[in-house]
Image: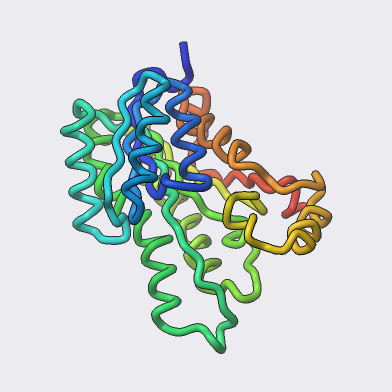
């Protein structure tokens, strides 16, 4: 039996990068997958087809998790379309708008905090009724090592990702008695299409500073998400797990 056989998962921001990798890993492991995207209908349709090839139900929803009403509507739609259950929520949607504080605008701050942190509140609040009724569920929040240690030029991103860690621990305490788990993943330097746009020299400097001497892959993060979504992690909640090749120990 596959690790997520018959479960229903929602993954926000899954049209590319880490979110896409998690969606693929979940479908491969037997989970039906609902995912959100903001822009490309074509990419969403392509991902739907890729996931369905694993023999599961998959559907993309054009939805902005940073908007409270959109998150509420999304949960209602998924419950209707997927038979009334939601077993796993992966709060992955996120953006960066980097700049030194002296050059950062109010809009740059607000956009990053709303999309990265408020979306986690919106989605968790919207899904909790269903999970409370089921008396089980796994909520997985994507943070970052930047939220753990900070980073110059990313005060908005660091604040949003650090906020997710406090929220995760609080929700674990609130919902644990109903067998609902809430954990955070803090990826380090993960090589995606976004990092592919950086100069190779810059990327190599990052790799050299990491104890494992390589950047992480999307699979490295997706494998941890799979573990946290599955019953194998049934006694783990309120934790932040770093996927960073040892970056925070160096």
In the image, taking residue 226 as reference, residue 74 lies left or right, namely: left
Residue drawn at x 43%, y 22% is 4
Extreme residue in the top direction = 1
In the image as oriented, which residue stretches furthest toward the bottom? 102
Whole-percent x, y for residue 78 in the image: 23, 37
Q: Is residue 5 left or right of residue 62?
A: right
Q: Position of residue 184 (x, y in %)?
A: 51, 46
Image quarter for residue 146?
bottom right
| Relative image position of residue 82 (x, y in whole percent) | 23, 29
Left or right, 24 with respect to 31, comes to: right
Q: Nearer the viewer, residue 130 or 33?
A: 33
Q: Nearer the viewer, residue 129 or 116?
A: 116
Quadrant in the picture for the C terminus? bottom right
Applied colour scheme = rainbow
Q: Is residue 235 above or below residue 190?
A: above
Residue beneath the point at 50% across and 55% down? 165
Residue 100, placed above or below residue 51: below
Rendered image quadrant of residue 39? bottom left
Task: Name the residue rendered at 45%, 29% in the picture.
Answer: 26
* Towards the viewer: 93 or 182: 93
Query: In this view of the protein, can residue 235 be seen by the observer?
Result: no
Observer-nearest of 70 and 55: 55
Residue 132 horizontal/vertical position (percent): 26, 35
Res 116 seen here: yes
- For the image, the number of numbered tags is 0
Give the residue drawn at x 37%, y 66%: 114
């Amino acid at each position: 039996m596959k690790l997520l056989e018959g479960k229903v998962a929602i993954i926000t921001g899954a049209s590319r990068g880490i979110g896409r990798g998690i969606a693929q890993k979940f479908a491969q492991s037997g989970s039906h997958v609902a995912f959100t995207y903001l822009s490309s209908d074509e990419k969403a349709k392509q991902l739907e087809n890729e996931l369905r090839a694993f023999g599961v139900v998959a559907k993309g929803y054009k939805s902005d998790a940073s908007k409270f009403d959109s998150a509420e509507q999304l949960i209602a739609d998924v419950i209707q379309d997927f038979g009334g259950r939601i077993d796993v929520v992966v709060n992955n949607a996120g953006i960066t708008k980097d700049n030194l504080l002296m050059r950062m605008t109010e809009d740059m701050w607000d956009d990053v905090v709303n999309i990265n942190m408020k979306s986690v509140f919106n989605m968790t609040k919207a899904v909790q009724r269903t999970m409370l009724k089921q008396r089980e569920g796994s909520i997985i929040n994507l943070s970052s090592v930047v939220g753990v240690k900070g980073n110059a030029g990313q005060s908005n991103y660091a604040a949003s990702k650090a906020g997710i860690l406090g929220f995760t621990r609080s929700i674990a305490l609130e919902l644990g008695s109903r067998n609902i788990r809430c954990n955070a993943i803090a990826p380090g330097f993960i090589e995606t299409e976004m990092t592919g746009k950086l100069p190779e020299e810059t990327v190599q400097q990052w790799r050299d500073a990491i104890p494992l001497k390589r950047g992480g892959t999307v699979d490295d993060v997706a494998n941890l998400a799979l573990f946290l979504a599955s019953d194998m992690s049934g006694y783990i909640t309120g934790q932040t797990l770093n996927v960073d090749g040892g970056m925070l120990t160096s």
